[in-house]
Amino acid sequence: MTIEADPEWWKTMFDELYLLTDARSVCDEEITRREVDLICRLLPIRSDQRVLDLCSGHGRHSLEFCARGFSRCILVDYSEYLLRCGRSRALERNHSMGFIQADARSTGLASASFDHVLILGNSFGYLRDAAGDGEILKEAHRVLRPAGWLLLDLADGTAVREKLSPEAWHEIGREIIVCRRREVEGDTVFVREMVLSKEKGLLRDRTYAIRFYDPAQIAALLNRTGFESVRVLTDFSPHRTPGDYGFMNRRMIALGRKV
């Protein structure tokens, strides 16, 4: 094991450079539309219901929901920078959305106040240990109204272990190169990411770690957290062209209902 990561890497990683390095997945509006299409097929979701976009990033999914007539979306994320980006885009498009900077384990939101909670784009498994993941799901359960639904979109750990390449790189335009080296230890993938500019040199050299779950594990975790009617759909990817999209290649959708 040669890659080590600060357990709290997620507190500082999600900045303007992240939106550049991961733009193929998180800044592609067509991909976002496909993901929201799937959510609308899987959930009994209506435009008049309250939706919590937990670990929302810059709010790309909520922006798409608002474009479809939803008017009661609340975003929660730890990254102040990403929330500022989301707020700016919402103002540009005249969308009414709420933005809250908070830890997903303790949002400060009222209990039983949302019809649906969404955790999307593989924004799960970032914390030091699995107990932290359980705390996020408990918080989602707490803020849901009875009969409300959680939808969790995350990488399929089984596919990650079978298919993940130890090294990958891609170019962004003619200027930026993103290089990643990955090591798997147990249920966690450790990554070293280097971002290089042909003109300016090294822009970033960071490490991070993401814990993965297979379908049975995430279903069991949802059940332990109090969710019922749990089901997990596998082999989902919004990408239409081949390529190494890291942990965004093969995803699974986990659904659970609060009784």
Image (spheres, rainbow, N blue to C red):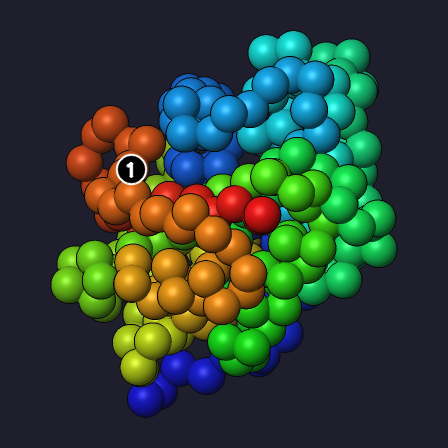
Q: Quadrant of residue 145?
A: top right
User: Which residue sits furthest left?
Assistant: 162
Residue occupying image coordinates x 47% and y 60%: 222
**Which quarter of the rendering shows the N terminus?**
bottom left
- Is 81 left or right of 226, judged from the image as shown? right
Rendered position, 119 above or below 201? above
Residue occupying image coordinates x 47% and y 52%: 228
Q: Quadrant of residue 149?
A: top right
Please name the residue that numbered disc 1 is placed on. 237
- Is 99 left or right of 224, judged from the image as shown? right
Residue occupying image coordinates x 24% and y 27%: 240
Q: How many discs appear?
A: 1
Rendering coords of residue 116 (x, y %): 61, 37
Q: What's the residue type where badge 1 is placed?
A: Ser
Rendering coords of residue 59 (x, y %): 64, 34
Rendering coords of residue 171 (x, y %): 35, 43
Asked whether residue 36 appears in the rendered view, the answer is no
What element does badge 1 sit on?
A: loop
- Observer-nearest residue: 222 or 34? 222
User: Which residue sits furthest bottom?
Assistant: 1
Residue occupying image coordinates x 64% and y 16%: 47
- Is 139 left or right of 40, judged from the image as shown? right
Rendered position, 93 above or below 106? above
Rendered position, 224 above or below 154? below
Rendering coords of residue 178 (x, y %): 39, 53
- Observer-nearest residue: 214 or 88? 214
Asked whether residue 185 appears in the rendered view, the answer is yes
Q: How would you rate the neighbour count of disc 1 (Cα within 10 Å): few for under 14, some for 14-19, many for 20 or more? A: some
Q: Quadrant of residue 147?
A: top right
